[in-house]
Amino acid sequence: MRSVFWNSILTRIFLGTFLDNAELTISLQRSSELAAEAFGTAHSIAEIGQQLAWLGTALRSSSCDIGVVACIPSISNIRTLVPQGSISYRLGFTVEEETIPLSNGQCWHSMFRNPVVVTGYPIPRRPTIGTGLELPLNMIAGLAKTKYIQPFNGGFFIKGFSTLLIPTKKEEPGGILIWHMIYNQDGDRISYLENDIPVAEGLNISEIATGRHILGWCSKAEYYAEARYDIKGSRLPKPRGTHYALEKVYIQGRQIIKGGSPRPFALGKKDIAFHISRENPVKRLEWIDRKFFILWDEEDKRGWLVNGCGTLLHLLRTSLESNGDSTNKFHFKFHFEKGRMEEASLTHKIDSAVQFLLNDNNLQQEIYRTKDGNFRVEDRLDDLYDVLEKIIEHQIHITERVGSNDKEYLEGWDFNDLATCEDPLYPRVSIFKKPSGGWIDFARTIRAVTLFGRGFGEIILPENTLCSQWATLPKEEYYLAAAVDDLQEIMKKEGDQYANPMRLADEIIWHTPMASFEKCKCQKKKYKLKGKHSDFVQAAIPAKLCNMLPSKDPVQLQKGGGAVIFGNSKKLNRVWEILLPRTDEETLPDLDFIRSTSSEEPPSSPSRDSGLGSSLNTIFTYTLSLTCRDYRVGIVCALPKELLAVRALFDQTHSRELLSSLEGDINQYALGQIYPHNVVAACLPSGEYGTNAAAIICSHMRRSFPKLKICLLVGIGGGVPSSGLRLGDVVVSQQAKGFPAVTQYDLGKFLHDGVFEITGYLQRPPQFIMIAISNLASDPELPCRPLETYLQDIARKHPEYGYPNHEDPLLTPTCSHDRDSRTGIQCDCLVIQSHPRPGNPRIHYGPIGSGNILLKNAEKRDELAANRGFLCFEMEAAGAMNTGDFLVIRGISDYCDASKNDTWQEYAAATAAAYAKLLLSKTTIPKDADALVPGPATTHPRKRVPTPESMNSDSNPTKKIRRKKELINGDMHI
């Protein structure tokens, strides 16, 4: 055919006859133009002309390197020829040079590099115009470089490596499904979780396969040294209960796309979008290799931290092994021969899995035959990768939604279910009978996925046997082994290898009770006869407890530096007593076991002593016997919304069982821990506010919890804008410019000339708290947004506490127009639109005005601020400080003027709570705090603190010394 064409390059004749006997002759002219001659009815000739015009338009090259252009066919030079009934014309093509801009319904532009759109032709009718590009389903999938429909999290998706297509809407009549595409422009992997668009509900596979599909909607958008592969099922139960993160999650396998055009199609290389053309197997493996899995042996009670490629290879080998198992009734259909696989050049190394998985010979090995061809190792690998990807996405989604969890249990998936392609997959849970030594928190922090099984063998073995005690990872001790190379990769991304102590991940440090890579002491003569061994177990401990640990030199790590074991070290028993979660009794996993270990008889343990024997009695007894005298921080809030923000920042929640022993106390308390401090928090009765209600609550709290050393009043307040405050900023009570930290501005006396003299000056907090504030304010290492992390923690649990994105109005002081409690009614007095600082509230220190008056008068606000230096106003501090020494922390929710409303209250409550946690992270209660903290104030506020004018009037040095001595002895009430 080719030789005939080139021998007749000047004229080449093509003849064709259609079903209605119409004839078509096509020739290639000397000028490289195409000439067509048709004989037939007018209808046939018109249809032939339309098809030729469409082909000539659609097959033209784009005039742009990137973007979509339009091409319009046209007819010109129409002439009537002899004989009668003959007509000639010329087809022309006009390309619009300006690219078509992205608009509604045109996210499909990004699926191509520089396509040409033919305009002027009819398309099938749609219920809604302008919805996008209609394509067969298999062509949509082909353009995304896949051939599968993926069920995930209750919806269906078409997912490539860097492209995700989401069904957003089903239109009737016609069964039209509208899809939206999102993608990563640089060609990197895209996550299921990057979609924030609601998925169309009520879809099933048959509807998707038979419907019409429009792409559009919107425009933006020596390892495994002795590993075994005959792994048994974990036989673990499914998680039941709301405290389990994976309770309602399950994984479904993908389904191949069968709908769409029955005719095959091919993708032109130059037409594929850049971000799609970059997809390749190497990028997929690079992504999953950066994820980490725990292979947990439920029978041996031990586990291994393994990178993604290592886990994928282990699953692949187990899957292939199960196919050829003689107990498999379909084993005769499998043709896979293990001997044909090529191992990595260096076996049992951390990167051996990558070499094996990228070996083309291995990937092309046949597993079984199908009518469409051979099912190969690369197909099975693709199946396993797909399931692991979904599991990882669920892990990330749930971790972000529920946050951290203090319980000692693991949630995950059955390794054998994955390897044998069970569908659907259900999660499993393993409850620990012994403390993990903190590695469970570490695993949750790095979002490691747990795969359960029985009989994993020895995933990691030491090259040189240390001793019989440590020749393999000990069983029944709940230890986790991890390769140093993997830990270095984790610290490179999540922590800091060069810190002292090393930081494994965010807020998790690596503590080494003793040298990690030395010889066991049983090798020394004086210990050998006694049969004593070193304890090589490492600890993963929250960074907030760093100061409790003895100082140690950091471990010197090197590439290829072997492996370490994490678990409960007997050298850290006292630390675990403080660290173990103190949770509600009804939510503790397997509490019967904990109670049994608290009996007089110590629990049984294997011969290998890991420090878990009799020490368990001390640990769990301490956990369940916390008393009111163990609480050193008290927090009082006026509104429930303020208390909610505080409780959302508890690191741990304590049991409320001890509250039943309180007599004569009507308060309801929330108990928990923030950093190392045990915290009790309370709120004023619903609907009550002001100094009296605050005084009652604080009196009960101080009586019921007699060891309180830090008392905080946390909530919202009205700011003084002339001080540079914005809505959402934080004000902390502090003496400034001769004015006390807190003044009750409505308490005083009228003088003979009608002047009101304020006498309600209140005492300040203990000195060690003010020192902590000074240290905090002067910390050069403090992040530029110190509250951001805590604000995100609150908003993640309670989205209504996030930044409100509303106006920050400031009225003239003379404005008296009332505004709507939520939105506000605009008036002519609005003169300044101040610029809020989204997510970056500032912290101000200065005097605070307190009183029983709800202040909504800008003129009075400015007058009091000018005379007394107030930065903000509130209504509870005066009552609280009548009972003791409180530090007042207020988030600014309004300006005490006519624009006062509720819009900013939740966010302001969150900023105040965030500062409280920041301060507690920097505060250490001195051991002699009892001698330094004054007792409760008297009930006569006028005589507690002298006025600012008389604060420095005392010139008697003997009197000053006596006052100082009385203050130290705790006898003086200022």
Image: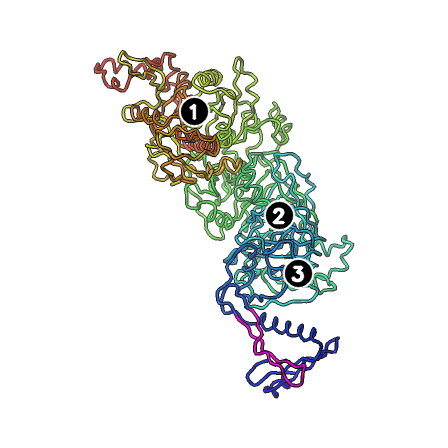
Q: Mark 2 Cα within 10 Å, few/some/many (few <14, many 20+)?
A: some
Q: Residue 199 carries which label?
A: 2
Q: Which amino acid does label 2 sit on?
A: Val
Q: Is mark 1 on a helix, strand or loop?
A: strand
Is residue 789 visible to the viewer in this orientation of the structure? yes
Real-space CA distance between mark 3 and mark 1, rounded to the nearest whole angstrom:
67 Å
Predominant SS along the magenta part: strand
Of residue 862 and residue 333, the one placed in the foreground of this image is 862
Residues at discs 3 and 1 in contact (Cβ within 8 Å): no
On-image quarter of the N terminus:
bottom right
Looking at the rendered image, the disc whose residue lies closer to the viewer, 2 or 1, is 2
**Residue in the image at 61% along x and 30% along y:** 587
Name the N-terminal-most of marks 2 and 1: 2
**Residue in the image at 73% along x and 76% along y:** 18
Real-space CA distance between mark 2 and mark 3, rounded to the nearest whole angstrom:
25 Å
Residue 651 in percent (x, y) is at 50, 32
Q: What element carries label 3?
A: loop
Name the N-terminal-most of marks 2 and 3: 3
Q: Residue 713 carries which label?
A: 1
Q: Mark 3 points at which residue?
A: 124
Of residue 323 and residue 855, the one placed in the foreground of this image is 855
Query: 268 above or below 838?
Result: below
**Residue 60 picture quarter:** bottom right
